[in-house]
């Protein structure tokens, strides 16, 4: 994994200064501390920071083809590179390195833009074709690796992180109110829209073509499901269990390919333990494991993780976090994520990655992606219940109940989207999105509402597959999960940005293309069977893990939300950010509404729907104010602001 940045002139062949490009790559040095290189010619500039994992000595980039007419800078991994390299050599190409970066120039020579059909893995790539003066910017199928871009002064700038764009000196950090509204709707900015005005995220499975000053966006892949009733089901599902086992073993084997040691995260739950089990089985010996312990800050899975690691023989490192450590880490987390973060557990993951780096490792496998493929989240179960009630008694009562609940939570100020808000469907997540959105009428300021106007966050969702209405309701929800939460939250706030902040590459066996494709074809009952989520994965787990682990109920990894910031031992910067002066300065939130909910949260200790909604809402308020302070001008609290010229050293990590 690396970091890339660059620029292309949309008006001609102006020179882009090397010092400006080096400022952009320097802002993301944490993504590639091992090397820095640039390639500049009239009208275009490509830069890369390298984290050396494959071909440590020979993989410097940007890298050209034989006649130096095609150049590429690449972030990520092509996990099938040994097979691709063999085929390229058979086709007559001469490869100068063993690094997968070089494959791109030759795939482009053979296939042009169809190269993405062969590019399977996790990646963001920039490729320059001098002969046709064409730039290609592409991103992997499910959005593991980020890629941002903006147009300014006739230049198209791009970077693996928004910091690279801001460091160019050409881009001003301005908030996008619609992006902030995404946080209070979907928990993240999970579309092309970011929290920064004028800065876009390239969607997963897409590429940009830049030629003759024109920038066009193209989709090269999209997740698909069979029509409802046409999914794969067998009288005896054993062959399907065996196929998934084979695909997961193959996926893990690919992600163990590395010229540096590989470790694994483990929570003690099913997904990560399956990954660690396959690692041990393939290597014939255990690999190191890393886990998190929460001290009075959420469900603590240390005992389960320790049991699993001991069973597999893996040496285990534990990072301990409590509420004060979560709060202390949060400014660094928001700097890394480049946006407000709702999920406070991401602070623990940031420290976990730092512990991995501190022990000299660069690569970690994780269990992310299993819940998206095989219906692991609780809202898929509630969707099945909701659909059953609706089928039994009709739409009237469920709809009236929802509206009544929302009105109670919001104090009668309820705001609801259309019943079928997501491309003509009502997936499981919409129930939760509508509930969380009921914090807005109390917390948003009048200026925020005026700035949003009639815009609906649902209008921004990149849900464009017209086949979605033909799928089983569970698969509709899984699709939305891949498109919004996976790319927008898990891969940013929990994945790439957090790991790469510590110069660690995270790899995700459950996000393998073949695994995703196989799971998408399965009948819904193999994913969610009654109350049992990930049913088929549990059958695979039973073949490699003890019964108590294979059948362990899912515990969603989460940490205390607003309780980490609003308790008696809260940091001083929290009160500063939530002061009437700071709230008025940003203009997003109503000071009276925020103050009322802060007081109300402390008076209502029991968990109720309303308390949960404002627990989420207040966490979003703190996080948004913090992000604005760090990136959009400061002045809200005593914390230092982000600057490309200022080093932010991480705090010590407590491990055991």
Image: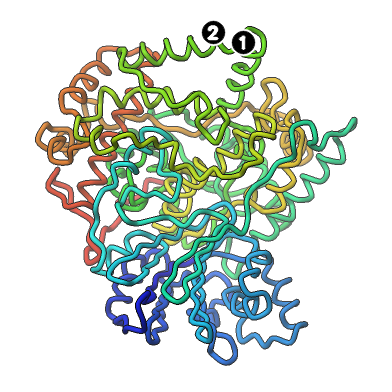
Between residue 274 and residue 449, name the one nearer to us.
449
Q: Which residue is mark 1?
A: 394
Q: Quadrant of residue 376?
A: top right
Whether label 2 touches label 1, CB < 8 Å: yes
Q: Which residue is mark 2?
A: 397
Looking at the picture, the colour scheme in use is: rainbow
Q: Is residue 379 left or right of residue 625?
A: right
Residue displayed at 74% across by 77% down = 86
Q: Is residue 635 above or below residue 39?
A: above
Between residue 385 and residue 43, name the one nearer to us.
43
Q: Is residue 364 above or below residue 481?
A: below
Residue displayed at 24% across by 52% down = 174
Point out the image quarter for the C terminus.
Answer: top left
Residue found farthest to the left: 581
Residue found farthest to the right: 235
Could one spot residue 656 in this view of the protein? no
């Amino acid at each position: 994994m690396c970091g890339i940045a660059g620029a292309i002139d949309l008006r001609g062949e102006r020179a882009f200064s090397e010092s400006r490009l080096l400022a952009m790559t320097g802002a993301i040095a944490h993504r590639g501390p091992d090397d820095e290189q640039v390639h500049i010619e009239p009208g275009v500039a490509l830069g890369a920071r390298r984290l050396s994992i494959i071909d440590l000595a020979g993989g410097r980039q940007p890298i050209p083809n034989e006649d130096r007419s095609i150049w590429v800078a690449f972030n990520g991994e092509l996990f099938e590179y040994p097979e691709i390299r063999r085929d390229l050599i058979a086709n007559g190409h001469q490869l100068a390195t063993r690094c997968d970066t070089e494959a791109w120039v030759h795939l482009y020579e053979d296939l042009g833009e169809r190269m993405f059909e062969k590019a399977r893995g996790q990646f963001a790539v920039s490729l320059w074709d001098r002969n046709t003066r064409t730039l290609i910017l592409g991103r992997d199928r499910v959005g593991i690796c980020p890629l941002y871009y903006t147009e300014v002064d006739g230049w198209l700038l791009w970077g693996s992180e928004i910091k690279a764009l801001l460091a160019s000196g050409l881009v001003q950090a301005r908030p996008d109110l619609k992006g902030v509204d995404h946080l209070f709707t979907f928990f993240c900015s999970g579309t092309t829209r970011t929290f920064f005005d004028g800065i876009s995220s390239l969607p997963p499975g897409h590429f940009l073509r830049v030629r003759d000053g024109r920038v066009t966006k193209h989709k090269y892949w999209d997740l698909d499901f069979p029509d409802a009733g046409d999914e794969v089901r067998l009288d005896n599902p054993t062959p399907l269990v065996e196929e998934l086992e084979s695909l997961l073993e193959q996926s893990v084997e690919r992600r163990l390919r590395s010229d540096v040691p590989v470790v694994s995260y483990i929570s003690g739950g099913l997904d990560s333990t399956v990954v660690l089990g396959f690692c041990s089985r393939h290597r014939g010996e255990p690999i190191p494991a890393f886990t998190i312990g929460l001290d009075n800050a959420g469900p603590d899975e240390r005992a389960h993780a320790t049991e699993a690691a001991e069973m597999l023989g893996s040496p285990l490192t534990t990072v301990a976090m409590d509420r004060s450590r979560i709060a202390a880490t949060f400014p660094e987390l928001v700097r890394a994520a480049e946006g407000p973060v709702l999920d406070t557990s991401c602070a623990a993951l940031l420290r976990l990655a730092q512990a991995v780096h501190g022990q000299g490792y660069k690569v970690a496998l994780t269990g992310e992606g299993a819940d998206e493929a095989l219906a692991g989240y609780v809202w898929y179960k509630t969707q099945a219940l909701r659909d059953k009630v609706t089928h039994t008694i009709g739409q009237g009562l469920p709809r009236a109940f929802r509206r009544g609940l929302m009105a109670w939570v919001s104090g009668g100020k309820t705001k609801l989207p259309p019943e079928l808000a997501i491309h003509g469907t009502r997936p499981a997540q919409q129930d939760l999105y509508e509930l969380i959105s009921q914090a807005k009428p109390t917390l948003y300021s009048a200026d925020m509402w005026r700035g949003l106007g009639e815009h609906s966050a649902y209008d921004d969702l990149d849900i464009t597959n017209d086949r979605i209405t033909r799928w089983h309701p569970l698969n509709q929800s899984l699709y939305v999960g891949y498109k919004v939460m996976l790319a927008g939250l898990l891969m940013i706030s929990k994945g790439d940005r957090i790991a790469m902040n510590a110069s660690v590459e995270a790899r995700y066996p459950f996000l393998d293309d073949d695994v995703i494709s196989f799971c998408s074809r399965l009948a819904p009952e193999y994913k969610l069977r009654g109350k049992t989520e990930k049913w088929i994965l549990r059958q695979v787990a039973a073949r490699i893990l003890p019964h108590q682990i294979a059948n362990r109920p899912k515990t969603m990894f989460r940490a205390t939300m607003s309780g980490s910031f609003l308790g008696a031992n809260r940091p001083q910067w929290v009160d500063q950010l939530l002061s009437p002066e700071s709230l008025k300065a940003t203009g997003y939130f109503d000071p009276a509404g925020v103050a009322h909910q802060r007081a109300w949260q402390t008076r209502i200790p029991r968990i109720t729907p309303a308390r949960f909604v404002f627990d989420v809402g207040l966490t979003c308020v703190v996080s948004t104010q913090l992000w604005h302070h760090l990136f959009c001008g400061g002045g809200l609290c005593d914390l230092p602001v982000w600057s490309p010229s200022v080093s932010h050293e991480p705090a010590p990590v407590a491990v055991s």
